[in-house]
């Protein structure tokens, strides 16, 4: 097990990566009152382990799935916290995938103006990305993550024990963010290509997860609240990914990020942000996890979702983060019509 | 006009106190996109001035009154922000009393994980207390301010121009927090007693408001998030005040704080926290604004509201902040039954 420090200004946190991380949960709560937020799937699979790790702690199991990442579910968590009489000194344990982490984290950020939170990510996506860095949010009004807060966890426990029960779709979802990290960090990229035969091997995934966390910890420590722009690099593929996710649903977040990176490689190439060779490298990287890019009928229309993206700063324009080279990125702000034309590439199967 | 700096760790803010403060609004927004949150009363009285100060800025007027300080109104603000296409670089202007400030501040804290906010308090209460220090919240599940965040405003503009249209009830409400400050800061206390004939004179109120802001700025700079305990002193009278407010409604927040301080003077005396003379001084101070303390039938039952208070850290016990002497305070944690007995004092008219 490895311990990675995330030295943010607001509150430093520690990420435990590897086997045995979950066994630290009791010690992390440290005798304080605990309140567990999880989802019904995780509760079914790991309910007993949770009860053993935190005897007597109240558990709030929200319905599973991104479509429940909304204000209704958030306020159900508050209902449960109030019913349990949770104090300001308590620790909220968010045990689940990205949705549980985002909502549990936000509940902790807001309950009595903020209580401590321990994140226990149970999906590959949450372990390599969303549980680290303090971003919390719900979706609202058709916009992803538009209501939220930066709220750093005290501790994040990334234990591979949870990966054994993940369906293939969830592994592919995590691979989306892992391959994204591979484009942002040249060393991670090389490792991924060198081990491309092991992308579904849990031992390898657990090892690369720690690499991804280490990379993200550096980025987040430098730019906790996405002010200087450094943290924006983590949005590679996300402008298009989020827009497609809102418009079409069904597929996982990570899969949409992969499709977003694929499409945005064409944007980077045609806007002169990267060489044709690098654009091809991006597409080849995406194909390590997603051999075939599906077609999206009417993809151009997704521009209206992209226009709602938080990253945008100009009316009528869309901000995209592009891979400019190995370990390099650049932001481009495109007029809506030009971005819509690029989306048109997705209308035919590749 | 005076400028008071609030040097908090998360984000320093500046409070402009005095005539001409409102005229700085345009400059504070500094050419950025602005979004105004106000209430229907303030909109009726000052709608034109707002439109002149921020031409073209969208205005969201929420229904007036503490009972609207809830999640429904908060999400209506988000609806309006999304409909207006507000960007992350925008400035939210919260222009109104404490309710508008609390909800507008929380909307700013959460929209796209936080945008800048300028507070323009229009009531005496908001000018002397709630607009400064970054506490934002809504009430939920019968608990005051239980969902919220610490989110420092960039700027606070306290202009006496708004005080002219306040009804006497609102002046008394502000006096509650002013007299509380008088108990916490000996110099403010002396000034209040020396000028006790001018407590309804707007020129005097505007002057003492700046003193209260200066005091609060010191406290908040030392303990922004109520962690070290220093900021807790601002809760004098509030445990009982909030419990009565939840149980009986109708009266203003400041009036309940006055009644709370009156009752808690008996607690302080009987618990040995202060001398009988000081307890009498507290009651005399309260009477400067509230000559007669009303009786509350069934006041003992309010203990169940006090048990939900955020300050509590032990199950079955109530935390109260007590005036221990001029400029001194102490926290006491009382078993629920003992606190309920003290509440019994309120059952007979004083």
Image (cartoon, coloured by chain):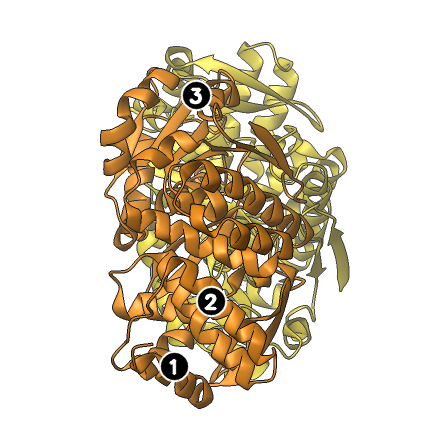
Chain colours: A orange, B yellow
Query: Which residue is more in the foreground, B333 or A108?
Result: A108
Q: Image quarter for residue B156?
A: bottom right
Is the same chain shared between marks 2 and 1? yes
How packed mark 3 is, by other alpha carbons closer than 10 Å (few <14, some 14-19, many 20 or more), is: some
Q: Which residue is mark 1?
A: A343
Which disc number belongs to residue A33? 3
Assign a secondary structure to mark 3: loop
Give the CA separation, mark 1 to mark 3.
49 Å
Q: Earlier in the sequence, mark 3 or mark 2?
A: 3
Asked if residue B291 shows in the view, the reply is no
The chain carrying label 3 is A
How packed mark 1 is, by other alpha carbons closer than 10 Å (few <14, some 14-19, many 20 or more), is: many
Assign a secondary structure to mark 1: helix
Q: Which residue is mark 2?
A: A284
Query: Which residue is more in the foreground, A46 or B295?
Result: A46
Closer mark to the observer between disc 2 and disc 1: 2
Q: Residue A325, how many percent across, how many down?
A: 63, 69
């Amino acid at each position: 097990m490895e311990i990675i420090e995330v030295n943010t200004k607001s509150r430093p946190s520690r990420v435990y990566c590897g086997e045995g991380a979950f066994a630290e949960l009791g010690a992390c709560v440290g005798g304080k009152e605990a309140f567990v937020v999880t989802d019904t799937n995780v509760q079914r699979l790991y309910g007993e382990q949770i009860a053993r790790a935190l005897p007597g702690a109240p558990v709030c199991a929200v319905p599973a799935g991104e479509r429940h990442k909304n204000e209704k579910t958030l306020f159900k968590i508050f209902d449960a916290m109030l019913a349990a009489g949770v104090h300001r000194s308590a620790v909220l344990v968010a045990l689940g995938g990205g949705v549980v982490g985002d909502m549990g984290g936000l509940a902790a950020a807001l309950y009595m103006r903020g209580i401590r939170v321990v994140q226990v990510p149970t999906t590959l996506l949450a372990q390599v990305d969303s549980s680290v860095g303090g971003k919390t949010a719900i979706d609202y009004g058709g916009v992803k993550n538009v209501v939220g807060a930066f709220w750093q966890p005290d501790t994040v426990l990334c234990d591979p024990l949870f990966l054994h029960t993940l369906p293939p779709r969830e592994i592919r979802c995590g691979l989306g963010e892992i391959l994204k990290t591979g484009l942002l960090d040249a060393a991670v990229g090389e490792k991924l290509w060198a081990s491309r035969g092991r992308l579904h091997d849990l031992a390898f995934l657990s090892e690369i997860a720690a690499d991804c966390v280490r990379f993200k910890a550096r980025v987040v420590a430098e730019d906790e609240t996405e002010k200087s722009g450094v943290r924006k690099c983590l949005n590679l593929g996300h402008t298009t990914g989020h827009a497609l996710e809102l418009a079409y649903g069904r597929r996982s977040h990570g899969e949409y990020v992969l499709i977003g990176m694929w499409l945005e490689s064409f944007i980077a190439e045609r806007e002169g942000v990267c060489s044709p060779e690098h654009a091809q490298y991006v597409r080849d990287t995406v194909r390590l996890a997603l051999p075939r890019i599906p077609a999206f009928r009417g993809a151009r229309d997704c521009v209206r979702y992209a226009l709602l993206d938080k990253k945008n700063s100009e009316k009528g324009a869309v901000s995209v983060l592009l891979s400019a080279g190995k370990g390099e990125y650049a932001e481009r702000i495109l007029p809506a019509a030009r971005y819509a034309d690029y989306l048109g590439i997705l209308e035919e199967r590749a």
